Amino acid sequence: MKRFDMRIIFGIVLVAAGALFLLENLGILHGGINLLWVLILGGAGTTFLYVFASNRNNWWALIPGTTLLAITLSIAIGIFAPALANALGGGIILGGIGLSFWLIFLTNRHFWWAVIPAGVLSSLAIVSVLDIYINTGGLFLVGLGLTFILLAILPGYENRLKWAYIPGGILTLIGVLTLPWLSGFFNIIWPLALIGAGGYVIYKNFKN
C-alpha cells in the first residue's frame, strides 16, 4: 500500500511538472520552474516538520524542515519580487537555519548548545540584510558576543554556563569598538579618558 501511495505522489509531481513546463513554453506562465521548486521544496520541508511533530525525539528533522521552508520562501519571493529576493534571500535562508536551532532549544532545554549556532546564524542573517544599506563591520561580533551572554544568563543551569560571560564580553567589546559608525565617538572618548586619568593622577599627587 505504501508503495502504491508513493507512486501516486510521484505521478502527481510529474503531472504538475509537465503542466508547468507546458504553460511556460506557451508563454502563459512565467517562472514555472521556480514555482515547481516551491512546491517540491515546500512539500519536503513540511514533511520533515511532520516527522518532528509526530515524534518529538526526532528533533533533527527541524533543521532540514525549516531550512527547506526558508529556501521555499526565498524562491517564492523571487518569483513575485525579484529585487526583494536579491536583498533578503540570503538573510531568509540563514534565518531559517537559525530558527531551526532556536526551536531545538525551546523544545528541549537540555540542548543548550543549540543557542550557539542559533545566535551565530541569526547574526549572519541580520548582517547579510543590513550590509546592503550600511557598513556592518563589527556587528557580527556584537551578535556573537550577545549570543554567549544570553547563554550565560539562561535560568535553570545552576551556574554551569557562567563561563560564557568571558567570550561573550570579549566578543561584544571588540565588536562595539569596531563598529564603523562609532569610530568618531571613540576618537573623542579615548583622548578624554586619557585626560581624565592624567588629571586624576595630578589631583591625587597635590592632595597628598
Image (spheres, helix red, strand yellow):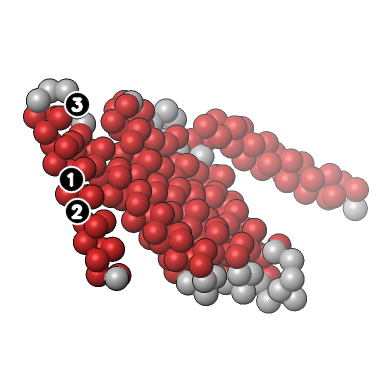
Marks 2/1 in contact by CB < 8 Å: the verdict is: yes
Q: Please tell me which residue lies in front, 59 or 188.
A: 59
Q: Quadrant of residue 61?
A: bottom left
Residue 54, position as x, y percentages in the image? 51, 67
Would residue 22 appear left or right of 164 to someone viewing this image? left
Disc 3 element = loop
Sequence-wise first label, 1 or 3: 1
Q: Which mark is residue 29?
A: 3
Q: Nearer the viewer, mark 1 or mark 3?
A: 1
Q: Nearer the viewer, mark 2 or mark 3?
A: 2
Residue 4, position as x, y percentages in the image? 24, 66
Q: Report crowding for label 1: few under 14, some 14 to 19, many 20 or more residues within 10 A (C-alpha).
A: few
Residue 186, position as x, y percentages in the image? 59, 37
Sequence-wise first label, 2 or 3: 2
Identify the residue position indicated by label 2 in the image. Answer: 11
Q: Amino acid at mark 1?
A: Val
In the image as oriented, which residue stretches furthest toward the right?
Answer: 207
Q: Quadrant of residue 28?
A: top left
Up/down of 17 relative to 145, above or below: above
Disc 2 element = helix
Identify the residue position indicated by label 1 in the image. Answer: 15
User: Is residue 14 visible to us here?
Assistant: yes
Would residue 72 appear left or right of 186 to someone viewing this image? left
* Measured Cα–Cα span from mark 1 to mark 3: 16 Å
Q: Please tell me which residue lies in front, 162 or 19.
A: 19
* Measured Cα–Cα span from mark 2 to mark 1: 6 Å
Would residue 139 appear left or right of 149 to someone viewing this image? left
Residue visible at 90% across and 48% down in the picture: 207
Residue visible at 66% across and 42% down in the picture: 194
Up/down of 105 relative to 177, above or below: below
